[in-house]
Image: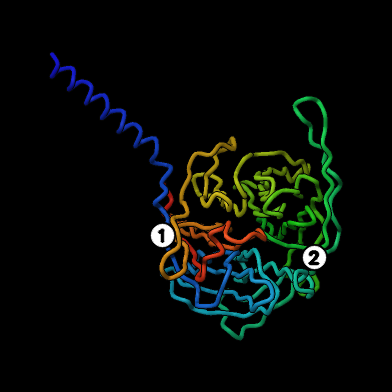
Amino acid sequence: MKKLLAGCISMLLLGVAVAWANDDSDDDRSAVRKFVTLPDGVRFPEGITANPANGDIYVSTFDGGNQNKLLRYSRNGTLLATREFGIAPLLGLELDRVHNKVYIANVGDFVGTGSKIQRIAADFNGASAIQDVASIPAIGAPAPRTVPNPDGSQDTISFGSGARVPNALTFDKAGNLYVSDSFQGAIFRIVNPDACAPSCVAQTWIHDPLLATAGFPPFGANGLVFNADESALFIANTGDDRVLRITPSSGAITVFAESINGADGLVFDRQGRLWVCANQNDEVVALNGNGRVVVRLGSFDGIGRDGAPKGLLFPASPVIVGDEMFVTNLAIALTPALGDEPEEDVTRWTVSRIKLPGL
């Protein structure tokens, strides 16, 4: 009888273990692999985009005061081209698939050269022309935000902005370009930029206190992506740990997901899951149509002997090519304290690749 009971208990525990393993199958912390290590001295990869026609991966650097670069890699990780952009740090990238050009968010306000959108040929080399597209207008901070408290009281948050910080970029199907501004709490729209450059006008499309932040990291409006039918534009607010949903037909903004630690770059996969880089949690998460986290991938696993992070460290921007996601590891220290952030010990920077589950 005791042997029978022990056998039943063993089978029960085995069943629980199998079920637990199945439950964790969408939380694979070991799914991250290194795609490339950036050349020696090239720091802080932030923006990323890809050319689905040939698999090329483009990476920009956010290294204020040093020479910033746009890098072009093949799908297998071979560095094909490097173009220097000067000391202005670069943020988001987006490929215009129709005209085969890469658009770049240039945060020149951080170094006194003026913030703007630029572009370059997708097959660029080290001497290819860089074309200005549009300057980012100075519209200032949005109105104060009123936040209700559980006891019926309210807090009022006032925002300030001394810089224009174009961050993420995305196109709609009509070829219009949308630009988030992390400090001004805005989204700008450039109508048909292929035809109007170099004197395009960035029109203020949305200017709202939900797009600003008083939180940490101190970046509000960030990652941008439309859903498949363009009935909604999703936008990350990094400092507020939120993903917001904008209805383009009305301009209405609602909170789609909360408590995503450092919500940054966004991308949809072909299953309709919305992937978010959680830059303060060193992971990427997938949201379902209700804003619930259904997959978590990645973790920070220390710094290797080569000085590069293992896994994800401050994942900033994602792009999907086939069944793989490529993610930049910005790995930048943000606090003035010494010794409190692993990013301080990084001496080489990486881009990661992740095999996506279910694709």
What element does badge 2 sit on?
Answer: loop
What residue is disc 2 on?
Answer: 136
Q: Residue 23 lies in what quarter of the image? A: top left
Q: Residue 184 lies in what quarter of the image? A: bottom right
Report the front residue among 277 and 324.
277
Position of residue 178 measured from the top left corner of the image (x, y, whole percent): 71, 58
Amino acid carrying mark 1 in the image? Arg
Going from N to C along the chain, the mark reached first, 2 or 1, is 1
What element does badge 1 sit on?
Answer: strand
Tell me the residue at 65%/45% (across/down): 241
Tell me the residue at 76%/58% (across/down): 189
Q: Is residue 118 left or right of residue 37?
A: right
Dot 2 crowding, Cα within 10 Å, few <14, some 14–19, many 20+: many
Res. 353 in view: no
Position of residue 243 measured from the top left corner of the image (x, y, whole percent): 65, 44
| Picture disc at residue 50 | none
Q: Residue furthest bottom?
A: 127
Tell me the residue at 73%/67% (across/down): 193
Q: Residue furthest front?
A: 338
Amino acid carrying mark 2 in the image? Ile
Camera-side mark, 2 or 1: 1
Tell me the residue at 55%/69% (across/down): 58
Q: Is residue 95 above or below residue 30?
A: below
Q: Is residue 280 above or below residue 120?
A: above
Position of residue 61 measured from the top left corner of the image (x, y, whole percent): 61, 70
What residue is disc 1 on?
Answer: 33
Report the front residue among 6 and 273.
6
